[in-house]
């Protein structure tokens, strides 16, 4: 199906473990974004990418790593998960100017 | 850096009435875009409306309109004839078109509750 897919939808992991959240788009949108959503903070940008092999930090990048070797994929890795990284993570794409498309979100719990 | 401010954490409106959700922004870019998204309790992000900084007319999409006042740097969302299904979190967002301003920045959101 066309669109943007995040996996997994739900994840529970232990403190200190590495975990990777996947984001895949079936379009070829240039821009891709990773946000985390926490109560009272709205959506905060973690990293974004303007094209394959071009990534940049957002507002809250510490503890996260991204890569974009292919236009359609933009994985987000938590190198050593902490409880403060418990959140809902959204991936989004943007092509042109007028609309950003969001994945369904990944609810991550770090215990 | 760009910033979005939504000063209303929660709003209530009676069904069938109109409601305005406030959004102010700050940017040094001359060219930028403003967005509104709806997030119902199910969690998905639903695009509502877009306004470009050089658009002379306010954007409208069905019952949604964007009251764009460039000099005041405000981009308020107006929902006419509210429905129970409009109860949701609403986010204002913006992006510039140069350098790091191309990131899409969100406000903290407004929780709208429509009362029967």
Image (cartoon, coloured by chain):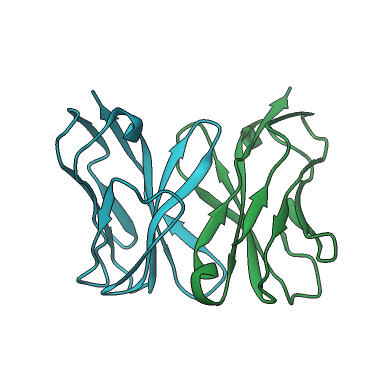
Chain colours: A cyan, B green
> Depth check: B21 or A35 in front?
A35
Q: Is residue A33 above or below residue A82?
A: below
Q: Is residue A66 left or right of residue B2?
A: left
Residue found at the very far left of the displayed protein = A17
Can residue B62 be seen by looking at this rendering? no
Q: Position of residue B75 (x, y in %)?
A: 75, 56
Name the quadrant of the C terminus of chain A: top left
Q: Residue at x 69, y 43 (%)?
A: B6
> Depth check: B8 or B39 in front?
B8
Q: Residue at x 61, y 60 (%)?
A: B2
Q: Residue at x 70, y 59 (%)?
A: B26
Q: Position of residue B69 (x, y in %)?
A: 83, 62
Q: Position of residue A55 (x, y in %)?
A: 33, 68
Can residue B99 be seen by looking at this rendering? yes
Q: Is residue B14 above or below residue A4?
A: above
Q: Is residue A47 above or below residue A35?
A: below
Q: Is residue B59 left or right of residue A1?
A: right
Name the quadrant of the N terminus of chain A: bottom left
Residue A102, image quadrant:
bottom left
Q: Is residue A87 left or right of residue A1?
A: right
């Amino acid at each position: 199906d066309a669109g943007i897919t995040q996996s997994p939808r739900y994840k529970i992991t232990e403190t200190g473990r590495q975990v990777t959240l996947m984001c895949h788009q079936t379009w070829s949108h240039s821009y891709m974004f990773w946000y985390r959503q926490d109560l009272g903070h709205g959506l905060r940008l973690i990293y974004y990418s303007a094209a394959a092999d071009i990534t940049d930090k957002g507002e809250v990048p510490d503890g996260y790593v991204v890569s974009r070797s292919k236009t359609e994929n933009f994985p987000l890795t938590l190198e050593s998960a902490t409880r403060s990284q418990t959140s809902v993570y959204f991936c989004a794409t943007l092509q042109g100017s007028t609309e950003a498309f969001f994945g369904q979100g990944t609810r991550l719990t770090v215990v | 850096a760009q910033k979005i401010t939504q000063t209303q954490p929660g709003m209530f409106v009676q069904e069938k009435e109109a409601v305005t959700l406030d959004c102010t922004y700050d940017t040094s870019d001359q060219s930028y875009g403003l967005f509104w998204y709806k997030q119902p309790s199910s969690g998905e992000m639903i695009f509502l409306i877009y306004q470009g900084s050089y658009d002379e007319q306010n954007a409208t999409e069905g019952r949604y309109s964007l009251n764009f006042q460039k000099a005041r740097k405000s981009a308020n969302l107006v929902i006419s004839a509210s429905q129970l299904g409009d109860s949701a979190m609403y986010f204002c967002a913006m992006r510039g078109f140069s350098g790091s301003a191309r990131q899409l920045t969100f406000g903290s959101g407004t929780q709208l509750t429509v009362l029967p």
